[in-house]
Amino acid sequence: MANIIQKKPWEQAGIKPIDEAIYYNRRQIIKQLGLTTIGMMAAPFVLGACQNPAQQNATGDSAPQEKSNTFDFEGMSDLYPATRNEKYTLDRPLTKEYDATHYNNFYEFINPRDVSIYNVYKYVEPFTTSDWSFEVSGLVKNKGKFDLEDIIKKIGLEERTYRFRCVERWAMAVPWTGFPLAKLIKLFEPKNEATHIRMVTYSNTEEMIGVRTQHWYPWPYYEGLRMDEAMNELAFIATGIFGKPLPKQNGAPMRLVVPWKYGYKNIKSIVKFEFINKEPETFWHKIAPNEYPFISNVNPEVPHPRWSQAMEYLIPDGEKRPTLKYNGYGEFVAGLYEK
Ligand SMILES: Nc1nc2c(c(=O)[nH]1)N[C@H]1C(S)=C(S)[C@@H](COP(=O)(O)O)O[C@H]1N2
Ligand SMILES: [Mo]
C-alpha cells in the first residue's frame, strides 16, 4: 500500500509507545472482567499506540475534517491566563504546547478504527464541556451538585509548572492552570471517617467514540486517592493548560493532576467526587490488577511487569532521561509514604 506512515521522531529514538492496554485485546479484558458478551463483538484488535498503521481507517468511523483550530475548548476563557505560582520549578524545558495537546491518552475518544494517541484530538468535537457541574457524595457534609464556574469564582485560579510521567515512559513538562484539590475538598467538609476520595469521568456513548465502541472496558473511568494524598499541596485540579482553558482532549473542563504518580491516576473530565472509608477500585487496576496498583507512585526502582521504569522519554522527540523517584517531588510527598 502507498499508505506508508512515517514513524514519529520519538518512536525512531528507540522507544515503543507501549499503551496501557497493548496486550489487552477484548477477549482478555472480557475474561478478566468476567463479562460474557463476547459474541457481540466485532473482529478482535489490539488496542494501543503500537497498532499496525495499515489497519488504520480500514472501515467505520473516519476522522472528521481537520479544523484549522485543533484547540477545541469551550467557555471561561476570560479567566486565563492566571498568575504563575513560582514555587513549583522545573529541571527541564516546557514541552511545546502543540505536542502536549496533540499527544494524548484518553480512551473515551480512541476510535478503534484509528487507534493512536496522536489521534485523540480528532474525535473530541462532539463532547460538550460547557456549563459543567459535578456531584459530591458520600461521607461529606456538603453533598450535592456544584457548578464548576461558581467554584472557580470562589477559589480562584493559579498556574503551576509540573513534570508529568506516563506509566508507558513518555514524559512532558507543562503549565497547568487550576486550583489545589485541597481547596476544593475543604469546601465540601468531608467527615472524619472519610479515608479516600473516588473520582469518576463523564461517560456518554453519543459523544465519546471509545465508550460507544469499546464495550469491554469498565466505563466510566474511575480513580482514587487516599485523603492524605488528596490534601497534599501538589494535588491539583487543572482547568487549563498553557494559559488557556483545557482542550477537550486534555480532560476539559476539570481533571486531576498528581505529578508524583503515573499518568493514569490523573483522571480527566471529572463529574463525581465521592468520599468513602475504604480504598476504591480503579479503572486500570480492575483491568490488570498486577500492573496498575492503587498507589502508583513514580519509582525508577519498581519496574512495570512488562518493562523497566528506570528511564523516561520526553515527547515529542524521545530525549531520554533517568526517571526520578516520586517524579522528582520527594520533598513534597515522601512523608506520605515513608513514615
Ligand atoms: N478519563 C480518562 N482519564 C485519563 C485517561 C483516560 O483514558 N481516560 N488516560 C490517563 C493516562 S494513561 C494518561 S498518561 C493521562 C494523559 O493526559 P494528557 O493526554 O493530558 O497528556 O491521562 C490519564 N487520564
Ligand atoms: Mo498513561
Image: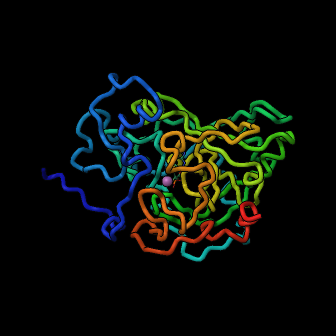
Residue at the image position 41 percent from the left and 23 percent from the top:
36
Out of 268 and 2, give the one closest to the viewer.
268
The residue located at (19%, 56%) in the rendering is 4
Colour setting? rainbow
Point out residue 179 in the picture as x, y percentages from the top left corner.
Answer: 73, 54
| In this view, 2 is above or below 12 | above
| Residue furthest bottom as drawn | 91
> Relative to residue 263, is residue 333 depicted above or below?
below
The spot of residue 319 in percent (x, y) is: 42, 74
Q: Is residue 189 left or right of residue 92?
A: right
In the image, farthest residue toward the left: 1
> Residue at point 43% right, 32% down?
216
Location of residue 232 (image quadrant): bottom right
Relative horizontal placement of residue 46, taking residue 149 as reference (left or right): left
Q: Position of residue 116 (x, y in %)?
A: 36, 49
Q: Name the image quarter holding the C terminus.
A: bottom right
Q: Position of residue 140 (x, y in %)?
A: 82, 36
Name which quarter of the figure residue 334 lies in. bottom right
Left or right of residue 142: residue 26: left
Q: Nearer the viewer, residue 330 or 243?
A: 330
Does 226 sit left or right of 29 as displayed? right
* Count of numbered badges drawn on the protein: 0
For the question of whether residue 209 can be seen, the reply is no
Quadrant of the rendered image containing residue 272: top right
Instruction: Please say whether residue 307 is visible from this viewpoint.
Output: yes
Residue that appears at 41% across and 57% down: 306
Asked if 30 appears above or below 150 in the picture, the reply is: above
